[in-house]
Amino acid sequence: MIQADRPPIASSNPGGRSGVRRGPRGRFHGRRRGAAAVELALVAPLLVLLLLGIAEFGSMFYVRQTLVHAARSGARELAIQGATEEEAITTAEDFLSTANVTGAVITAQNAYAGSGDDAAAREVWVEIVLPTQNALILGDALDLFPAGSNITVRATLRKEGELLTAPTS
């Protein structure tokens, strides 16, 4: 089958047979022109969306792990004899500022004398709450999470030694 719009290309064979070559891309080249562009136009948005989703969830898990480490640092500070809640919160804030995480609310609870001497009464904890949009690269532009959702982490340790007296407010 010879295409009418292009003249055939003559080829010489060592066997002496002359034939018609259909071009370097084969027989159906004229019918497939632009098919790759159409396929790319259909697949590219899905690939970009998939890559953005991977980046968003990766960012969220990275920030969550950073919050866990900050809460543990604050709780370790609070478990030290004589440490205060303000020192623990400052330690956690310093950790988060080093990691460029902003917008977190940090609370802490210390163990004080008078609340008992069992393991539960000696617990100290630091809790960090961060809005989900602050943990994402695009700020939840893809609308993946419900409004007002937060990432909450809490680190709990036990205070050893003599318990302090509760501060008076």
Image (cartoon, helix red, strand yellow):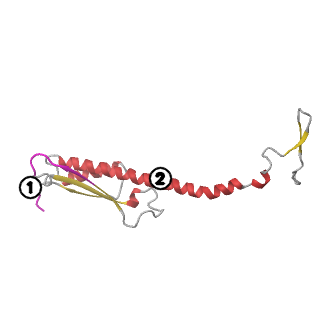
Most extreme residue toward the left, as rendered? Answer: 114
Most extreme residue toward the bottom, as rendered? Answer: 147
Residue of label 2: 55
Most extreme residue toward the top, as rendered? Answer: 14
Instruction: Give the image quarter of residue 113.
Output: bottom left
Which badge, 1 or 2, is on the more N-terminal residue? 2
Q: Which is nearer the eye, 37 or 1? A: 1
Q: Is residue 105 magenta?
A: no
Mark 1 residue element? loop
Percent coordinates x, y for residue 10 in the rendering: 90, 42
Q: Which is nearer the eye, 123 or 85? A: 123
User: Magenta residues?
Assistant: 154-169
- Checking the image for residue 116, the label placed there is 1
Q: Which is nearer the eye, 25 or 51? A: 25
Q: Residue at x 78, y 51 (%)?
A: 28
- Magenta portion: prevailing SS class: loop
Q: Which is nearer the eye, 84 or 155? A: 155
Which amino acid, by three-letter code, is at mark 2? Ala
Percent coordinates x, y for residue 53 in the rendering: 48, 56
Image side of residue 96 versus residue 42, left or right: left
Which amino acid, by three-letter code, is at mark 1? Gly
